Image (spheres, rainbow, N blue to C red):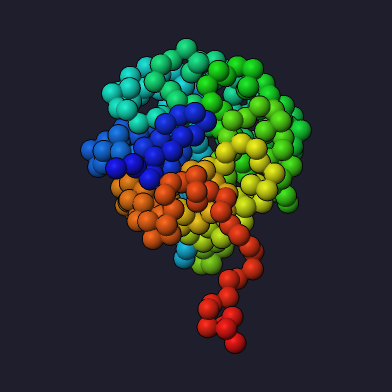
């Protein structure tokens, strides 16, 4: 019997279209005793930098009414330690492993990519372009389409593997950035990253997060993320991997209908580490309910932005 969930992303076979998102799934190895990593559609590691980063001061997480604010500060062991200590263990699994890459200058990104290029066991890369570009006056790569284009184009010259670019939702319009990354040679887009946010303690009149601002994720951002995926899909010629508050199979199907080809599950793993697998199982049942034989038949199948009228109402 055909697996209705099986699909491909940038030519890479995925058991299902649900990937474990970067930043919430560690290096994957931390979850190996909690779930079968080989059953995942794919996984994306914590962001890797040229040098190890200790991260931001505590507290780093704050629970909100419909999600979570985090400011971990991209803590990671650095690319060399990842290649030496983490990747050899990840090669024991058949799950496609994408490595998230970030930096503060273009050369930082290129340095990480160059080290990863010589390693076996990596399916592709996800560029996190939401970091400050300190060499260019503190602007963000993700808030300037030209800076976005330049970074992706330079990365494309280095990378022979598929290149996903993780876009920020903290922009006035997403389409110029979609255009920039696909013209620069990206193979896919991850959308969306977290929303800049602030939570305050009224008693102390201070921020709840050690670094002040943090990134809002979870169910509260899902409708905005779905809208951005839809808008991106109107001009995208490359696949979109949708994320932002996905907690169950119906949520995942909504992103696919809006125009995504695959999805990522992140914050939900804080509630249940098995969340990516559970979402995939539920997505299969949701697709059966919708009569969708495979993910391609569901992806981008939105018909209208107007509510559908019920039969009783239309008969009047």
Answer left or right for 48 relative to 40.
right
Q: Residue furthest top?
A: 118
Q: Residue at x 64, y 47 (%)?
A: 233
Q: Is residue 214 visible?
A: no
Up the image or down, 196 lies above or below 32; here it is: below
Answer left or right for 298 relative to 90.
right
| Residue situated in front as seen by the camera: 105 or 162 | 162
**Image-quadrant location for residue 237:** top right
Q: Quadrant of the N terminus?
A: top left
**Image-quadrant location for residue 129:** top right
**Image-quadrant location for residue 223:** bottom right
Q: Residue furthest left?
A: 33
Label tally: 0
Up the image or down, 307 lies above or below 18; here it is: below
Up the image or down, 239 lies above or below 217; here it is: above
Q: Residue at x 63, y 62 (%)?
A: 304
| Residue situated in front as seen by the camera: 197 or 141 | 141
Q: Quadrant of the C terminus?
A: bottom right
Q: Is residue 284 visible?
A: yes
Residue 78 drawn at (x, y percent): 46, 24
| Residue situated in front as seen by the camera: 116 or 239 | 239
Residue 213 drawn at (x, y percent): 58, 50
Residue 199 drawn at (x, y percent): 54, 59
Q: Residue at x 54, y 26 (%)?
A: 162
Q: Residue at x 58, y 35 (%)?
A: 188
Q: Residue furthest front?
A: 315
Answer left or right for 69 relative to 91.
right
Residue 181 drawn at (x, y percent): 67, 33
């Amino acid at each position: 019997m055909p697996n209705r969930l099986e699909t491909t992303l940038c030519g890479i076979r995925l058991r299902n279209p649900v990937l474990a998102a970067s930043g919430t799934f560690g290096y994957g190895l931390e979850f190996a005793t909690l779930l079968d990593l080989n059953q995942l559609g794919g996984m994306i590691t914590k962001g890797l930098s040229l040098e190890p980063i200790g991260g931001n001061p505590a507290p780093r997480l704050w629970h909100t009414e419909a999600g979570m604010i985090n400011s971990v500060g991209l803590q990671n062991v650095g690319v060399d330690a990842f290649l030496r200590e983490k990747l050899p263990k990840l090669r024991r699994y058949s799950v496609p492993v994408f490595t998230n890459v970030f930096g503060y200058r273009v050369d930082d990104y290129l340095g990480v990519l160059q080290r990863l290029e010589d390693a076996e066991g990596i399916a592709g890369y996800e560029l996190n372009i939401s970091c400050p570009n300190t060499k260019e006056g503190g602007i963000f790569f993700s808030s300037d389409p030209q800076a976005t284009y330049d970074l992706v184009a330079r990365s494309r010259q280095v990378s022979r593997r598929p290149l996903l670019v993780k876009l920020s939702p903290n922009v006035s319009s997403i389409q110029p950035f979609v255009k920039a990354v696909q013209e620069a040679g990206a193979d896919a887009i991850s959308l969306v990253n977290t929303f800049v946010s602030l939570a305050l303690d009224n008693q102390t009149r201070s921020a709840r997060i050690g670094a002040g601002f943090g990134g809002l994720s979870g169910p509260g951002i899902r409708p905005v993320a779905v809208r951005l995926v839809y808008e991106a899909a109107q001009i995208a010629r490359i696949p979109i991997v949708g994320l932002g508050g996905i907690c169950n199979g119906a949520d995942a199907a909504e992103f696919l209908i809006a125009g995504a080809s695959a999805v990522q599950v992140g914050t939900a793993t804080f509630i249940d580490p098995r969340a990516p697998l559970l979402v995939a199982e539920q997505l299969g049942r949701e697709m059966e309910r919708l009569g969708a034989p495979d993910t391609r038949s569901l992806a981008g199948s939105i018909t209208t932005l107007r509510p559908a009228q019920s039969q009783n109402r239309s008969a009047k």
